[in-house]
C-alpha cells in the first residue's frame, strides 16, 4: 500500500433511502471534507425490512417528526426536501440491490444521493423497478442490464451480505457515520465534528506510522 493510499481516510455512511436525515447528512459531510483526502462510501441499512410495515405520510408520526425536526434542519441547511406522499413508504431492498449493481459498474458514489433526491425532492416511488431503472439510465448505467439483474435477484445475496456487515458494525440508526477505524457519529453530523474526526484519524495514523511524535515522546 502506498503512502497516498494510507493517508486517505475512509468514511462509511450507513443510510436508508427513506430516511430524510440521511439526505440532510450529505451537506455537512461534503462541506467538511471537500479539501481533505477522504473516500466516502455509502453503506446499505434497511430501517424497516420486509415484512415490517413501512410508514404512511397520512398518519400522525411522519408529519409530526418532519415539522419538529426535518423541516427546521433543512431550512437551516438550505436543503430542498419534502415529505413524500408515496403511501405506504416503499421498501428499499430493491433500491439497495440496484446500488450493488451501480457499485459494480463504478457508479456507487452517484447512485445513493440520486435515489435520495428522487424520493425526497421528486416524490418518486423508489420501490418500483421502472423508477430505479430510469435513475440507473440517467447515471449512464445499462438499462437492460440493470433491469435484468434486479429482476433475476442477481444482487440479493450481495445486499444481504451488506446487511450482515451493518449488523457486525452494530448499526441501529440512520445515518451512522464511521470515520477511519474508530470515530463514530450517529445522526446528522456537524461540519466541525466531521473535520475533527478526519484530522484526528490522520494524526493517529501518523503517530502509528512513526512519522510524528506522540504524547510519550519520539
Image (tube, rainbow, N blue to C red):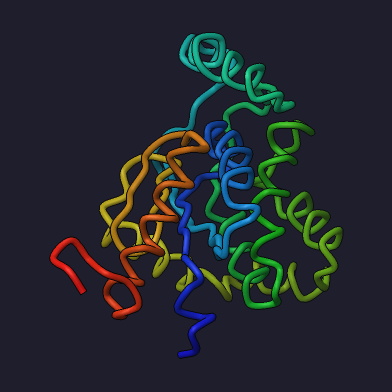
- If the image is split into quadrants, where does the C terminus sit? bottom left
Task: Check the image and report above or below for 52 versus 65.
Answer: below
**Horizontally, is 42 left or right of 118 in the view?**
left
Q: Nearer the viewer, residue 207 or 15?
A: 207
Drawn side of residue 134 relative to residue 110, left or right: right
Instruction: Give the farthest residue toward the front.
Output: 217
Residue 47, by quadrant, is top left
Look at the picture and state if 191 lies above or below 197: above
Identity of the residue drawn at 71% across and 68% down:
107
Q: How many marks?
A: 0
Q: Residue at x 42, y 49 (%)?
A: 177
Percent position (x, y) of residue 118?
Answer: 74, 41
- Residue sitting at 63 percent across and 38 percent down? 27
Q: Residue at image x 63%, y 47%?
A: 30
Is residue 50 something that shows in the picture? no
Image coordinates for residue 55, horizontal then vertical, percent: 49, 26
Amino acid at each position: 500500500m502506498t503512502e497516498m493510499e494510507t493517508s486517505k481516510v475512509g468514511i462509511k455512511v450507513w443510510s436508508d433511502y427513506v430516511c430524510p436525515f440521511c439526505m440532510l447528512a450529505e451537506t455537512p459531510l461534503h462541506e467538511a471534507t471537500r479539501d481533505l483526502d477522504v473516500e466516502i462510501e455509502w453503506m446499505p441499512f434497511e430501517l424497516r425490512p420486509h415484512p415490517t410495515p413501512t410508514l404512511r405520510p397520512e398518519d400522525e408520526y411522519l408529519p409530526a417528526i418532519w415539522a419538529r425536526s426535518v423541516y427546521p434542519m433543512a431550512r437551516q441547511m438550505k436543503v430542498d426536501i419534502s415529505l413524500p406522499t408515496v403511501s405506504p413508504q416503499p421498501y428499499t431492498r430493491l433500491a439497495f440491490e440496484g446500488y450493488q449493481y451501480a457499485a459494480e459498474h463504478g457508479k456507487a458514489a452517484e447512485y445513493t444521493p440520486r435515489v435520495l433526491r428522487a424520493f425526497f425532492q421528486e416524490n418518486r416511488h423508489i420501490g418500483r423497478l421502472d423508477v430505479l431503472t430510469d435513475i440507473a439510465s440517467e447515471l449512464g448505467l445499462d438499462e437492460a442490464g440493470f433491469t435484468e439483474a434486479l429482476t433475476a435477484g442477481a444482487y440479493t445475496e450481495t445486499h444481504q451480505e451488506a446487511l450482515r456487515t451493518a449488523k457486525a458494525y452494530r448499526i441501529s440508526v440512520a445515518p451512522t457515520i464511521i470515520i477511519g477505524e474508530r470515530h463514530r457519529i450517529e445522526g446528522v453530523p456537524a461540519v466541525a465534528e466531521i473535520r475533527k474526526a478526519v484530522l484526528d484519524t490522520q494524526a493517529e495514523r501518523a503517530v502509528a506510522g512513526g512519522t510524528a511524535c506522540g504524547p510519550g515522546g519520539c
